[in-house]
Image (cartoon, rainbow, N blue to C red):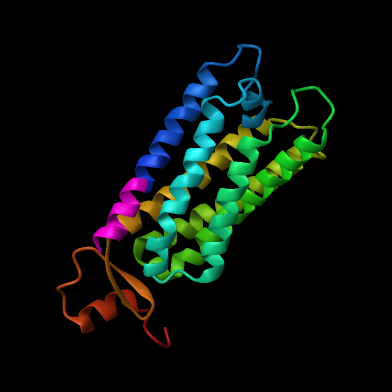
Amino acid sequence: MPGTRNSGLLALGGIALAAVLAVLGHLEVSDDLNPWSLTVSDFAVSDRGGVIDTAMAVLAAATVVLLPALRRAGAGRLAGTLLVAWSAGLLAAAVVPTNEPGLPMDTAAYLHRYASVVAFLALPVAGWLLARPLGGRAAGWLRGLALTSLLLAAVMVWSAYPGDRLLIGLAERVLILAEVALLAVVAVVAATLAGRRVGGVAVPRGWEHRPLAEVAREVTPARGA
């Protein structure tokens, strides 16, 4: 389906733009900010409404663009809801700032924190749920990146509390890298879908003219295996 492929390509463009903006946002801040011990939010609050906040909004929009394509590919309602939660969490974190580094947390900072937590947890679970309907090699990548993201999220939680924020900035940036990679895999699959499904699994582009029985053997797990 052209609409499905266009959605995937548009989302990939948004993901790439968000990545460029995030890098630029790190280059423009004060040299006094340490990326290993301070989070991305700590960098963003020093430049309210700047490129890092814009990057978060662009990434949220890129996710929303994918939703219709994923529904056509057979994604379940729960996966779609989790992607919406990821997007909403990103937008909330972009709009509501955290506190300046070293200052006590206020209500806005707590809202920012928990919006970020919702986003970081929602996307890997959605990726795991999308592995089956998207199928193929993408399934392995999605499951691997989902598990990696959840592990890194646990490391970040440890750092934020008993770890006294030890390397919390590094942990968060690797987590973000894993989650953006997961989203990019979903966008790539959406860009290559041909719009047919066999047994609830999306058929990749270029397979639409193959015999149905042959396609079914490729994308449907053998029973009893």
List x then y, in percent, for residue 85: 60, 55
Residue span colored magenta:
1-10
Residue beneath the point at 28% across and 75% down: 218
In the rendered structure, does residue 4 fall within the stretch colored magenta? yes
Front position in the image: 193 or 177: 193
Q: Residue 214 lies in what quarter of the image?
A: bottom left
List x then y, in percent, for residue 60: 51, 45
Q: Is residue 36 visible?
A: no
List x then y, in percent, for residue 157: 73, 44
User: Left or right: where does residue 10 sit relative to residue 213?
Assistant: right
- Where is the N terminus found, in terms of image quarters? bottom left
User: Left or right: where does residue 82 sit relative to residue 4?
Assistant: right
Would you place residue 55 above or below residue 35 in this image? below
Would you place residue 52 above or below residue 79 in this image? above
Residue beneath the point at 39% across and 37% down: 16
Check the image and name the residue furthest to the top: 31
Q: Can residue 93 be seen in this view?
A: yes
